[in-house]
Amino acid sequence: MNIASAEYQYDICWRYFELHANQRLKTFNFFLVIQGVLFALLIEQLKAEGWSATPFLSILGFSICIVAVVFSGLDNRTRELIHHAESKLIRIEKAISLEHEKDASVFYANIFSSEDGTSKIGRLTQAPKYTVCFRILFNGTFLIGLIFAFMYFFLR
């Protein structure tokens, strides 16, 4: 592989990775804003009506569930695109590294290809990943929404 071509490919893959990584965080922030508004409405409804089940409370619960499912799907797709870019970046890094290996004066940081082995310390000792934290929030808000969605049908 030509060094200039590999570096150009790396640049394109990096931009692709950066685009989707930023998109994932922006999407998650948007999820938090929407769920924050829905939970604020839910709390206001509970303050106004108490724990008596109302149709509006049920609608809010279903809305919370739908938002959680939609944003979970968006996050899964964006995560796949990020992993696709990471795998390409690792391959290109390794190719560039092999080319630079011949010239000792050139240092090339293998950020993606060297990180792969260092983050797998142990299940309990490693820091939680974004995916785990996001899924906990998606699933947690879904379950809370589900409780309020069906509360009207069971408590009336």
Image (cartoon, helix red, strand yellow):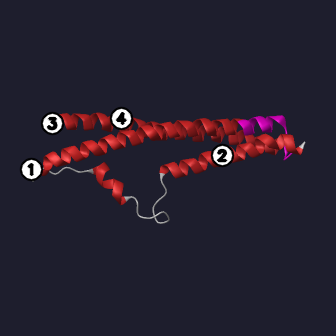
Q: Amino acid at mark 3?
A: Asn
- Residue labelled with disc 2: 141
Which residue is pictured at 33% across the width and 54% down the height?
115
Neighbourhood count class around disc 2 (C-alpha, 10 Å): few under 14, some 14–19, many 20 upward: many
Neighbourhood count class around disc 4 (C-alpha, 10 Å): few under 14, some 14–19, many 20 upward: some
- Residue labelled with disc 1: 103
Give the structural element (helix, strand or loop) at label 3.
loop
Q: CA distance from mark 3 to mark 2?
A: 50 Å
Figure check: 13 above or below 109: above
Judging depth in this view, the residue of 148 and 78 nearest the camera is: 78
| Left or right: where 105 falls relative to 139 | left
> Overall secondary structure of the magenta stretch?
helix
Q: Amino acid at mark 1?
A: Asp
Give the structural element (helix, strand or loop) at label 1.
loop
Q: Nearer the viewer, mark 1 or mark 2?
A: 1
Label 3 with label 1: CB-CB less than 8 Å: no
Q: Earlier in the sequence, mark 3 or mark 1?
A: 3
Q: Where on the picture, by quarter, is residue 60? A: top right
Q: Earlier in the sequence, mark 3 or mark 2?
A: 3
Examine the structure image and report whether residue 51 is included in the region drawn in magenta: yes
Asked whether residue 12 appears in the rendered view, the answer is yes
Examine the structure image and report whether residue 53 is included in the region drawn in magenta: yes
- Residue labelled with disc 3: 2
The residue segment tinted magenta is 49-62
Label 3 with label 2: CB-CB less than 8 Å: no
Q: CA distance from mark 1 to mark 4?
A: 29 Å
Q: CA distance from mark 1 to mark 2?
A: 54 Å
| Left or right: where 51 falls relative to 128 | right
Q: Amino acid at mark 2?
A: Thr
